[in-house]
Amino acid sequence: MVTSRIERLVSTANEIILGKEHEWRLALSCLLARGHLLIEDVPGTGKTTLAHTFARLLGLQCQRIQFTSDLLPADILGVSVFERESATFRFRPGPVFTQLILADEINRATPKTQSALLEAMEERQVTSDGQTLPLPELFFVIATQNPSHQIGTFPLPESQLDRFLLRIRLGYPDRAAERALLQGQDRRTLLESIEPVMSHTELLALQNMARTLIVSERLIDYAQALLAATRQSTDFAIGLSPRAGLGLIAAARAWALIEGRDHVLPEDVQRIFPHLAGHRLRLVSDGHMPGPDDLARLLQSVAVT
């Protein structure tokens, strides 16, 4: 029954985002693992559509924040306003107080504004004027990022990148998918006609179920070996953090659940690893993020125990 619900969700999403089933499954794994997702690609490849598809199919409240160079932290978190009648300040919540945040073009805002999301993403709360306010139980950030070489972008600091569980690229569609896209109905019009396929209760149940999947001691050994390889390698300036290790196990569990299993295999870890490690590592040679070939060599260097 769990598998049928997930497959229905995936198949419906495939009607909107053509030819990107693998990327959609990764994004769903990120959500089921209670992480946050970073999508990096050139404009026009469907990053925003993917976020709206999530909100629509799961019936989530969604707020879109367009990040620009003049955006302020208060525009995201909210602000305290003085009310004359009561002679007190009242906090007006910002758009972060919702279930799904679409942080569009997050790297077009300054680092100060980007950092406004740090507490929300890690602790699922916002502190303002000494008062701590909880965020919804279902809280998911999907941030889109333009390539760093484009004009008007600011690099995301390491502390921000580490709070994104996975990073994916959608890329251009293949020829068949693009032809179907050109001949078919407008994606946004099609999205409006689709009803939610999963309730909040079902989604929370799946998130809780993902936490219970069996992870053997040998698989923990394998995950630790991968973490150690990033820290000991002379190719990388810094290795993966313990937070990344926890995320690797959580996302591998979620991927295994989507695949219909009650236990995690090394292949699940290998599927997740490039999308978890790529944005957290920096090459010593040029300071850039490692490419797919670098991460493939790293995976090949660690034996499955």
Image (tube, helix red, strand yellow):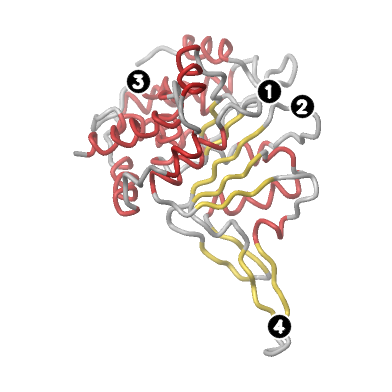
Q: Is residue 194 above or below residue 78?
A: above
Position of the N terminus, as image quadrant, is top left
Mark with earlier residue (3, 2): 2
Position of the C terminus, as image quadrant, is top left
Q: Is residue 116 above or below residue 33?
A: below
The 10 Å Cα crowd at callout 4, few under 14, some 14 to 19, many 20 or more, is few
**Tag count in the figure?**
4
Q: CA distance from mark 4 to mark 3?
A: 58 Å
Q: Nearer the viewer, residue 196 or 75?
A: 196
Mark with earlier residue (4, 1): 4
Q: CA distance from mark 4 to mark 1?
A: 51 Å
Q: Which residue is mark 3?
A: 266
Q: Are marks 4 and 2 in contact (CB under 8 Å)?
A: no
* Dot 3: element: helix
Q: CA distance from mark 4 to mark 2?
A: 43 Å
Q: Are marks 2 and 1 in contact (CB under 8 Å)?
A: no
Amino acid type assigned to the residue bearing label 1 in the image = Ala
Amino acid type assigned to the residue bearing label 4 in the image = Glu
Q: Which residue is mark 2?
A: 150
Answer with left or right where residue 249 lies relative to residue 141.
left
Q: Are marks 4 and 3 in contact (CB under 8 Å)?
A: no
Picture residue at 67% right of the left edge, 36% below the top? 158
Amino acid type assigned to the residue bearing label 3 in the image = Pro
Of badges 3 and 2, the one in the foreground is 2
Q: Which residue is mark 4?
A: 83
Mark with earlier residue (4, 3): 4
* Dot 2: element: loop
Q: Which residue is mark 1?
A: 237
Mark with earlier residue (1, 3): 1
